[in-house]
């Protein structure tokens, strides 16, 4: 048998297949695109504003509690019970505000992530068509343990993203 063996042809076929595979780090796209950076700052601003309101309400609640403790000896049992109930209600309101802030920030973050993901997917599709790529995988430590850095097209995606979505 003088012809090429299937085993000898396998490395060449593997190299050709690898040229049709690429990786994109979505986390980097979220953090490094202009839209992602701006979105992160906006989220931080929303959270800081909400946290400031929570801090003020927490301080107010603390002062009311300290006032109650200082005046406790001079107040009737009925007045003490009334003020304690007010403190419980204020504390519950504070907990609800905190939960609402967390939910608002999480919702906005999810919307931003979804928007960027959809835009990245469209850009990756265009790059894949240009390059003749057959598959583009999401690069993450959980899914890709090792890959040749030459397969990573994240930088190209970020540049294309920023050009298209200013």
Image: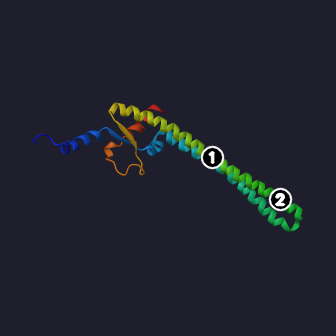
Could you tell me if the residues under marks 2 and 1 are in contact, i.e. CB atoms within 8 Å? no
Of the residues under marks 2 and 1, which one precedes in the sequence?
Answer: 2
Task: Work out whether residue 4 or residue 23 is closer to the camera in this orientation and state it.
Answer: 4
Question: Which label belongs to residue 140?
Answer: none
Label 2: state its secondary structure: helix
User: Can you identify the residue that label 1 sits on?
Assistant: 103
Residue for point 80% across, 65% down: 69
Is 65 displayed left or right of 130 in the figure? right
Is 17 displayed left or right of 98 in the figure? left
The image position of residue 13, as x and y in percent, is: 24, 40
User: Can you identify the residue that label 2 sits on?
Assistant: 83
Please say which color scheme the image uses: rainbow
Location of residue 71 (image quadrant): bottom right
Crowding at label 1, few (<14), some or many (≥20) Cα neighbours within 10 Å? few
Crowding at label 2, few (<14), some or many (≥20) Cα neighbours within 10 Å? some
Residue for point 26% across, 39% down: 16
């Amino acid at each position: 048998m003088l012809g090429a063996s299937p085993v000898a042809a396998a490395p060449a076929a593997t190299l050709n297949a690898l040229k049709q595979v690429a990786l994109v780090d979505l986390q980097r796209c979220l953090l490094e695109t202009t839209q992602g950076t701006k979105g992160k700052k906006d989220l931080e601003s929303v959270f800081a504003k909400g946290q400031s309101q929570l801090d003020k309400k927490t301080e107010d609640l603390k002062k009311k509690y300290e006032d109650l403790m200082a005046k406790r000896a001079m107040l009737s049992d009925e007045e003490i019970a009334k003020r304690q109930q007010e403190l419980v209600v204020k504390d519950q309101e504070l907990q609800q505000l905190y939960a609402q802030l967390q939910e608002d920030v999480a919702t906005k973050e999810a919307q931003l992530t979804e928007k960027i993901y959809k835009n990245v997917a469209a850009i990756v599709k265009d790059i894949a068509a240009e390059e003749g790529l057959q598959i583009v995988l999401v690069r993450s430590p959980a899914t890709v343990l090792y890959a040749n850095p030459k397969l990573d097209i994240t930088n190209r995606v970020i540049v294309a993203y920023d050009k298209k979505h200013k």
